[in-house]
Amino acid sequence: MHHKLELLYGWLYPLIRKLGFGDTFASYTSLVVNMIEMVGVAFIIYWVFRFTLVTILAVVAQRTKTNFDDLLVNNKTAKYISYLIPFLFIYKSVPVILEEYVYWEAFFGKVVGVYIVVLTLWIIRSILKSIRDFLKEKPKYADKPIDSFIQVIMIMLWVVGSGIIISSIFEISTNTLLGTLGAVSAFVILIFRDTILGFVASVQVATNDMVRIGDWITFDKYGADGDVIEINLATVKVRNFDHTTTTIPTYSLISDSFRNWRGMLDSDGRRIKRSILIKAKSIRFLEEHELQKMKQIQLISQYIDSRQQEITKFNAAHQIDKSLLVNGRNMTNFGLFRKYITGYLEQHPGLNKNMILLCRQLQPTAQGIPLEIYAFSKDQRFEQYEYIMADIFDHVMASVPYFDLEIFELSSTLVSDSTPN
C-alpha cells in the first residue's frame, strides 16, 4: 500500500526537477498538487463507494424478506461507511505526502485519526440502532428495555474511543492513560453516578421483569399514571392518561414503590370495589305482610319462600314467642337487600362469574353501614370498566327505596354549618 502511494504522489517532484526548477519550488508545487490529487481521489472513492453500497443495500433490502437491511438503510449505515473509506485513504496518504514536513504530518495525521475514530463509532451506533429497531418489532422483545442496553454499549465504546483519541492527540501510552483513569476513578464515578445507577436499575428491571414498555404504572411520587412508552438508561417515560408525559429516573423503579397494573390487565377481570353507606336507623325486621310484598321482586322471591320456611320451622321448634319481632329468627330489609344485590350481580352480563363476586357488609361507621360490592368486570378497558361499574351502582342506588332503606347523605344544614365564613 505504501509503495503504491509513493508511485501515486512521487511522480511530480522529479519531473519538475528535470525541467530545471529549484528544489524549493519543486517541493511546494508537488505538495500542493499532491494535496489536490489526494482530495480528488478521496472524493472519487467516496462517490463510488456511496453509490455502490447504497445501491447494493437498497437492492438487497427489496429482495429479502427480513427488514433488518431496510433499517440499515434508514439509519444511514452505508452512508457512514462511504465516509469512512476515503478518510482511511487520506490517513494512509498523509505520511507519504507530508513526509518531509514532520509537524504537519503529525498534526493532520492526528486530526484525520480522530475523525476516523468518531466515524467508526457512528457506524457502530447506526448498526446498534438498526438492531434495536429490529428487535422492537419482535413481540418477544417489544416490551424489553433495549434502549438501556444500547446506551450502555455506546457509553463503553465512547469511553474506549475517547481513550484512543486522547492517547493519539497527546501521545500517551494506553497503560499510562489507564493508570491516570484509575487515580481519578472516584471523580469518574461521581460524574457517571446517574449513568451507573441507571445501568444497574435497567439490568434489574429487565431481569426481574418489573416494568415493560406498554405497562400501565402508577407512580404517585412523580405524578405518573399511564402507559410506559420508553425505558432507557437514565429515564423512564410515561404517557399519562391526560396525554401529558412524565419522566421518571430509572433508578427510582427499584428504590421507590410504584404500582404496575399489568397483572390486572393480563387477568380475566378488573376489580370493582366500591361501597354505599346505608343509614343504620333504616335497618329493621320485616313483618309478614312486608315479606309478601317483597316476593314481587323476582330475584329474591324463591329465596324469601325458602328462608321463610326455614325460619318458621326453627321458631316453632324452639317455641319462640313471635308477639315481638325481635324474638327468634327474622329477616331484615338490609339482609334481603344484600341478597337481592348478589342475585343482580350474578345476572349482570358485564361481570366475570368465574372470579370473586359478592355483596358484603363492612364495619359500621359514624356515617352509616357500608355496603360494598366486590366483583370483577370482564372488560378491563377503562371506558368499559367505568360504564359497567356505573351501571351497577345506578341500579343499586335506585333499588334502595324498594327495601325501605336510606342512603346516607350530609344534610344541607350540616354542610352550610361546616363551611368556614
Image (cartoon, rainbow, N blue to C red):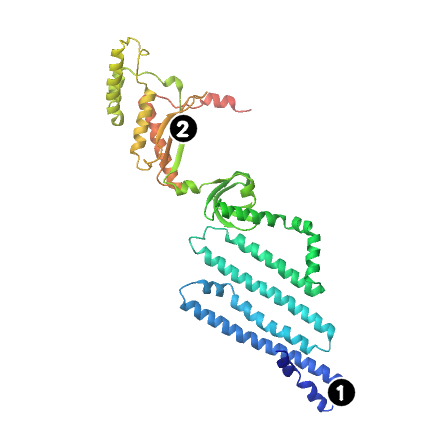
Identify the residue at image location x=67%, y=78%.
Answer: 96
**In what quadrant of the picture does the N terminus appear?**
bottom right
Give the structural element (helix, strand or loop) at label 1: loop
What residue is pinned by disc 1? 22
For image coordinates 71% across by 56% down, the residue present is 180
- Measured in 3D between alpha carbons, the distance from the residue under mark 1 to the one under mark 2, in whole angstroms, is 104 Å
Pointer 2 residue: 275
Which quarter of the picture shows residue 118?
A: bottom right
Chain-order first, disc 1 or disc 2: 1
The answer to whether mark 1 and mark 2 are in CB contact below 8 A is: no
- Up-down: is 398 above or below 46? above
Report the mark closest to the observer, 1 or 2. 1
Say which of 415 and 16 sits in front. Answer: 16
Residue 14: % across, % down: 70, 87
Identify which amino acid the numbered label 2 is placed on: Ser
Query: Residue at 50% across / 53% down in the picture?
Result: 146
